[in-house]
Amino acid sequence: MDRTRMTRLASLALVLALVFTLGALGGCKKDEPAPADEDTATSTNTTDTTTAEEPADASEPVADDEEPPTEMTVRLYWVEAGENSLGVERTLPYSVGIASATMEALLEGPTAAEQQTWPAIATVIPEGTELLGLTIKDGVAKVDLSDSFDDGGGTFSVTARVAQVVYTLAQFPTVDSVEFYMEGTKVNVFSSEGLILNKPQTPEDYYDLLPIDA
């Protein structure tokens, strides 16, 4: 093969190579980005929930494999020697509603044995006073008593009976103060003695009257 023919063949191969390369480049496209997802509107329906007032101070739950206790020890507050008051421990049958059971015991008055102690203890809560309701919420015990609760008595008696209830309920860790009701109506001024109860009562309000615990 002469030199001229070889040169032509080489030139032809070069041209074909260039054409092939340009064609390959022309056939490639840059990847397009995927379309963004459309925003999806979401709505959440919320329902307001109101927490009902808790029943009177339930005690600690008992595990399934444990026997429930049969007794519980509480403290009841009585008037001592007609001057101040004394907290006396009392063993009661076990109850889930420990605060209600304790209030019921307080309204029943001291036992015969307790009345024989010296100095003598007594209650100034009028006989026949009944517990109509008791709820505890956010540290406030709302106690509803029958209208016998304000029967008779002077300033000391009226103040001391309120103090008996306040101190008895405030022993529970869920109770910081006590709000009084009679026959379902909130008490703002108590008895003919005019004791002001327009806010929840705390033990600090009665320190001068009930400083002693047994």
Image (cartoon, grey):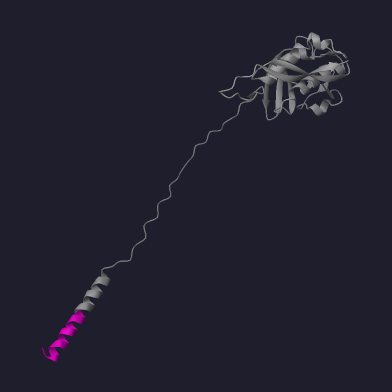
Residue 190, can we see it? no
**Closer to us: 33 or 81:** 81
Q: Main secondary structure of the magenta part?
A: helix
Residue at 37% over, 60% down: 33
Assign the C terminus to one quadrant of the image: top right
> Quadrant of residue 24 in the image?
bottom left
Residue 13 horizontal side relative to residue 69, left or right: left
Decide: is 184 above or below 26.
Answer: above
Q: Which residues are magenta?
A: 1-15
- Where residue 1 sits: x, y (%)? 10, 88
Residue at 71% over, 14% down: 104
Residue 44, can we see it? yes
- Where residue 59 sits: x, y (%)? 65, 23
- Where residue 211 sits: x, y (%)? 85, 25
Q: Residue furthest bottom?
A: 3
- Where residue 110 sits: x, y (%)? 79, 12
Residue at 83% over, 25% down: 206
Q: Residue furthest left?
A: 1
Residue at 19% over, 78% down: 16
| In magenta segment, residue 7 | yes
> Quadrant of residue 9 in the image?
bottom left
Instruction: Count the labels in the image.
Output: 0
**Closer to us: 111 or 44:** 111
Residue 133 horizontal side relative to residue 85, left or right: left
